[in-house]
């Protein structure tokens, strides 16, 4: 199993629109082959800073979702709401 850490920062005043769209992305990821679980955390010092942690059966499963047309279309709605590029890190147990 791998863990994928996605760090995003939302532009001011777009928090509620971002919440709706990001929830849609996670809901669609749940149906992707190899998805195990996921959660989103909010920085206690900066409410526009979000961290999504998802667990995947394998890196191949994550890559299939990451490169999918479905995710690309969903992210096309989400990206304009962020004031920085998302940072994605893939982790595995040592």
Image (spheres, helix red, strand yellow):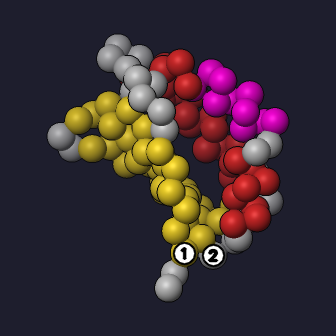
Mark 1 closeness class: few <14, some 14–19, many ≥20 residues within 10 Å: few
**Residue occupied by mark 1:** 92
**Residue occupied by mark 2:** 1
| Residue 32 appears in the figure | no
Q: Residue 94: x percent and y percent?
A: 50, 85
Real-space Cα separation, disc 1 to disc 2, in angstroms: 7 Å
Give the secondary structure at mark 1.
strand
Q: Residue 47: x percent and y percent?
A: 27, 34
Q: Residue furthest top?
A: 13
Q: Residue at x 50, y 57 (%)?
A: 89
The stretch drawn in magenta includes residue 77: yes
Q: Which residues are magenta?
A: 69-78
Measured along the vertical axis of the image, is residue 64 above or below residue 49?
below
Measured along the vertical axis of the image, is residue 80 above or below residue 27?
above
Q: Residue 15: x percent and y percent?
A: 39, 23
Position of residue 13 in the picture relative to residue 91 (left or right): left
Q: Residue at x 69, y 71 (%)?
A: 57
Q: Residue at x 55, y 34 (%)?
A: 22
Position of residue 38 in the picture relative to residue 15 (left or right): right
Image label count: 2
Measured along the vertical axis of the image, is residue 46 above or below residue 4?
above
Question: Closer to the camera, 24 or 83?
Answer: 83
Instruction: Tell me the tag on residue 49.
Output: none
Mark 2 closeness class: few <14, some 14–19, many ≥20 residues within 10 Å: some
Check the picture and name the quadrant holding the N terminus.
bottom right
Question: Closer to the camera, 84 or 26?
Answer: 84
Do the residues bearing badges 1 and 2 touch, measured as CB atoms within 8 Å? Answer: yes
Give the secondary structure at mark 2.
loop
| Residue 60 appears in the figure | yes
Q: Residue at x 51, y 81 (%)?
A: 93
């Amino acid at each position: 199993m791998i863990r994928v850490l996605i760090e995003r920062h939302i532009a001011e005043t777009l928090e509620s629109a971002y919440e709706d769209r990001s929830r849609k992305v996670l809901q669609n990821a749940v149906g992707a082959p190899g998805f195990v679980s996921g959660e989103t955390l909010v920085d206690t010092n900066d409410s526009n800073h979000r961290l999504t942690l998802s667990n995947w059966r394998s890196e191949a499963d994550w890559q299939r979702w990451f490169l999918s047309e479905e995710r690309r279309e969903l992210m096309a709605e989400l990206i304009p709401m962020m004031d920085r590029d998302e940072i994605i890190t893939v982790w595995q147990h040592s």
